[in-house]
Amino acid sequence: MRLFIAIQLNRKMKNALSDLQDRLRREGVRGNFTRRENLHITLAFIGEYPDKDEVIDVLERISFVPFRISLDGIGSFGSLWWAGIRGSRDLANLANQLRRALAAAGIPFDRKRFSPHITLIRKPVCRSGSIPEEVLQDLPRAEMTVDHISLMRSDRGKQGMIYTELFP
């Protein structure tokens, strides 16, 4: 099973991001756009792992007080364009706590530095080669309360990736 731990986004946040994706399309951007139902913030990517119950045991021990997050700009990592999340000590603490708990349980995960973002498009192609200036001038605004984290399974389907929530 291919697993990851994520924050699922609320409808308002997904609406703002879907609108942004539509604006990118109108500006002529092409590529592999993340489907609306797949928009999320990855806290830890586990990858292939046979025992979801072990991961669930770790998640059940994680406790946190609900906190707010908000969108903050867009950017890129090479051939991936993303929406950013305003700096949040609570979000960083949650990611660190989760990653320490996974490590203590011997569950492998991608140990790249946590950089909170929401993937919008992979392999973008556009006239300018970068995020269109028109889009950068009117960025989406949305916020939400994070009150739980989810264990997700990722499967490759005919229309792209299919994410299924396994916990809670």
Image (cartoon, rainbow, N blue to C red):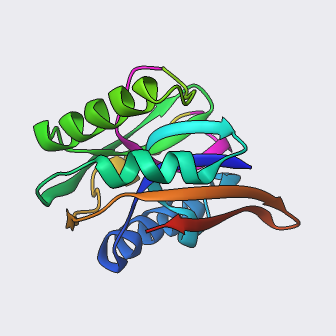
- Kindly indicate the quadrant of the structure image that contains residue 27: bottom right
112 on left or right of 129: left
- Above or below residue 125? Residue 112 is above
**Percent x, y for residue 8?**
41, 64
- Above or below residue 155? Residue 96 is above
- Kindly indicate the quadrant of the structure image that contains residue 94: top left
24 on left or right of 100: right
Whether residue 4 appears in this view of the structure is yes
**Percent x, y for residue 55?**
51, 46
- Closest to the observer: 35 or 61? 61
Query: Which residue is farthest top?
Result: 112
Query: Which residue is farthest right?
Result: 158
Magenta-colored stretch includes residue 37: no
**Percent x, y for residue 73?**
29, 45
Magenta residue span: 112-129
96 on left or right of 4: left
- Closest to the observer: 143 or 139? 143
Whether residue 131 appears in this view of the structure is no
Determine the residue positioned at 58% across, 25% down: 78
Determine the residue positioned at 73% across, 44% down: 50
Magenta-colored stretch includes residue 127: yes
Q: Quadrant of the C terminus?
A: bottom left
